Image (spheres, rainbow, N blue to C red):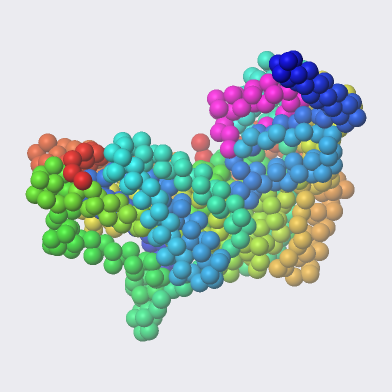
Amino acid sequence: MIKFCTRIFSLITLGISVLFFVISSAFAGSPTKVGFVYLTTPGDHGWTYAHELGKQMVEKRFGKDVKVSVVENVPEGPDATRVIRELAKQGNEIIFTTSFGYMEPTLKVAKEFPNIKFEHITGYKRSKNVATGNIRFYEGRYIQGVVAGLMTKTNKIGYIGAYPIAEVIMGINAFAQGLKSVNKDASISVIWANTWYDPVKEADAAKVHIAEGADVLAQHTDSPAMLQIAEKNGAMGFGQSTDMSAFAPKAQLFASINNWGPYYIKKIEELRNGKWNTGDGPNHWPGNVWGGIKSDMLVISKFQNMPANVAQKAQEALDGIKSGKINIFAGPLIDNTGKEIIPAGKALDDGALWGMNYYLQGVNGKVPG
Amino acid sequence: MEALILTIIATSIPLLLAATGELIAEKSGILNLGVEGMMLSGAVGALGAVLWLENPYYGIIAGALSGLLMASIFSVFTINFMTNQVATGLGLTIFATGLTGLAGAPLVGKTIPSLPKIEFFLLSDIPLIGSILFKQDFVAYLSIAIIIFISFFLKYSKSGIILRAVGDDHQSAHSVGYPVKKIRWYATCFGGMCAGIGGAYIPLVLTPHWSEGMTAGRGWIALALVVFASWIPWRIIVGALIFGGITIAQLVGQARGWPIPSQLLSMMPYIATIIALTMISGRLSKNNSVVPSSLGKPFFGGQ
């Protein structure tokens, strides 16, 4: 008898829970499952932190309509393949892989899961279900160059780069173009840190630049160390990825802030409407995103610690880029050995930017390797 | 030039402290590969303490205590439970990387006042020498004081000789009646405190903020320095300055456009370590006294 009662009881419980499940899912509609893969943790206060802010915008915009899963601290390489595959198996419908080194792993997993959409950040290889997203970071560099050219007294600009890859070289050259537009006498010297992240080394590089006479510093590495050194030694600099004025209230001129949120939201929306695509062109597929200041993916923080006329020039450059009046890589472009890259009247296209392995006029030395 | 020399000195000090601490631990026979982890906890502890108590000097104490805490975890496992020292040390670094990431999360984005420079009146005004020798911060003086103290301690004091005896032959030291485990505990904890202060130096002086894994491998360099110095304290100063010097020279070379690949110069300190290692092992065959003979071996007897 007791056994019978238990059976009835469990049957009823089961029935009720199934009913609940059906009702709740019918009313809520099934949420879109979204996966993110992070290189470090949001604690880096730089690259990954910016992605975290983007993810939070997604959650705010869609609320219960999306279910977000994040995996942090995923090394680039075989581990990444495993993590991405796991996210795909868990039923995520769109997966954002947020570092350049995830390119091959993303393509590999995408082949195994043809019905899942993948978005690879900063890569250049695509397939039927892998689209790419990137920010035109170099647009912010141009404005940095304009401000640096007007602020420098020694005409020496110190630049700290991570690795000599197209992405970083593009930024240095855009900086040089901005610099040249306001100050023909200033030049840039580059120190390669050979790492994206080593605060002590970045600080050392900044100290060396200052000892060598530079008074405006720029960086393409991840920590706020450079700005802190600038602050201590009375030099100036620019924030990277996020607003770093808390670290250097007197030294930060402005920061180029990465704003991934609008891109994430757009792609998730497209997926939910059944409009997600990678297009079909060979190089400029419409479904792939490379947005800059115009599309709000690169945000320029407040101009500070500079006289009003410099801020005005900076604002003009910003407006010029936004309206399309300024084409940063318009000819005539001459590299720093005197070779003509492109004649007047023409401009480099996006493909040519990704092939940059030279410095333009205004940069000292030559690209290593 | 002066600014560059000061940069070299500043960049060497964390290495100097961590290596000195590790030297003492290794002299007692304990190979602690957790230096990187102890430095990280020193860094996060120091930053937290300064934010809380608003005085950079408390950062030094907090750094030492955080390093000490990590070292005692290591000691419990390797000395009392006799686990493998290499595995435990690696484990300690991995553990500390995660723990400091967690503990440091609320500290991200905050900045602290730096440790002030201590000046000696007229001496500090001497050009070049004044600012190099008599215008440093407390930790810089402390690290030199520790090295001088350690040199005399190991060579001339009775306790120092006992410590070396424990590291060279723990069985004999035990049979003569010395408390091997206790001595190793002390030595490891001293090592942890030094590494903690070394780690604390990074947020206190070099770059006053916290971000995950900010020591970026300096603990491993410190380990190599001990070998480079062939377990002789004053040579650590030389090694740390050479390492710092090459690091800075490499950056200066790039800024000035020297035609040497930066990657090659970045390799130099490591090449120097390998050469030193080869020379030491060459000498080992003739003279067995350089490496503590019980290094890395667990002690099973006693208590």
Horizontal side of B90 relative to A23 (left or right) equals left
Question: Residue A312 occupies which quadrant of the picture?
Answer: bottom right
* Residue B200 inside the magenta-drawn segment: no
Q: In this orientation, does residue A200 appear? A: yes
Q: In this orientation, does residue A158 appear? A: no
Report x, y in % for residue A308. 79, 69
Q: Measuring 55% from the left and 41% from the top, which residue is drawn there?
A: A163
Question: Residue A71 occupies which quadrant of the picture?
Answer: top right
Which stretch is magenta?
A: A73-97
> Furthest residue to the front?
A1
Horizontal side of B253 relative to B79 (left or right) equals right
Q: Nearer the viewer, residue B303 or B173?
A: B303
Report x, y in % for residue B205. 47, 64
Q: Measuring 35% from the left and 54% from the top, which residue is drawn there?
A: B192
Q: Measuring 41% from the left and 47% from the top, which residue is drawn there?
A: B36
* Residue A94 inside the magenta-drawn segment: yes
Is B48 rendered above or below residue A34?
below
